[in-house]
Amino acid sequence: MLRRCLDGLYLLAGYAAGLFLVAILVLMMLLSVGRQVGFNIPAGDDFASWCMAAMAFLGLAHTFKSGEMIRVGLVIDRLDGRKRWYFEIFSLVLGLGFVGFFAWHAALLTYDSWRFNDMAQGVVAVPLWIPQLGYSGGLVVLFIAFVDEFAHVVRGGMPRYEKPPATTAEEVVERAIQSGV
């Protein structure tokens, strides 16, 4: 049940990132067409940039768990067996430290913005904690994904964030097409 809840959380964050991407599209189209017809969205650029930040951070955990995050395997791909497992653990601990640090401070920033009632300095006065929720929430979900993956790998499981190597030429071509190379 916990596995389904965690996977649902990552998927929900991914869908939220997708919704913010659609919101960016709609805002940019309205701003572009609005210039031609004399229609203006006050602080439209601010809203689009807040949507972009929320999209980027909310999509991190889903991207990580789907094995789509950029990963440099120059060292780890040359290792096997126990050495590779230790290096995976070391990498996950390092990632946990960095992501945990950023998630903690992002959550504190959002909490302080709420506590001090910080307002955006643009045309529309928006409480800053509202757009900061996407940033801090995305980092917290990414931290949960790192903890989840760390617990899985420590128990002896294969890393789920790493796709198995391609076995056929068609699979290599398909992955290259999907990645946009």
Image (cartoon, rainbow, N blue to C red):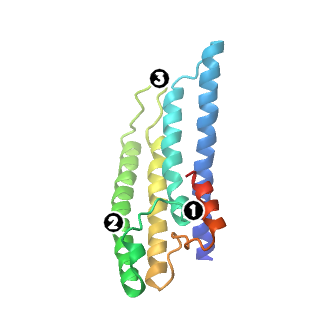
Which residue matches tag 1?
10
Residue 76, how many percent across, how many down? 39, 73
Which residue matches tag 2?
97
Residue drawn where x is 44% and y is 75% of the image: 150
Rounded to the nearest angstrom, the CA distance separating label 1 from label 3 is 34 Å
Alpha-carbon neighbours of circle 3 within 10 Å: few (<14), some, or many (≥20)? few
Residue 57, how many percent across, how many down? 48, 51
Do residues under tags 1 and 2 come within 8 Å of each other at their CB atoms?
no
Q: Quadrant of residue 165?
A: bottom right
The secondary structure type at the circle numbered 3 is loop
N-terminal-most mark, 2 or 3: 2
Do residues under tags 2 and 3 come within 8 Å of each other at their CB atoms?
no
Query: Extreme front residue here?
Result: 169
Q: Quadrant of residue 147?
A: bottom left
Residue type, numbered disc 3 = Val
Numbered badge on residue 123: 3
N-terminal-most mark, 1 or 2: 1
Residue 90, how many percent across, how many down? 34, 75
60 lies above or below 127: below
Marks counted in the figure total 3
Residue drawn where x is 50% and y is 28% of the image: 45
N-terminal-most mark, 1 or 3: 1
Left or right placement of residue 108 versus residue 3 in this view: left
Residue type, numbered disc 1 = Tyr
Residue 107, how many percent across, how many down? 40, 53
Left or right placement of residue 20 versus residue 72 in this view: right
Residue drawn where x is 54% and y is 27% of the image: 44
Residue type, numbered disc 2 = Gly
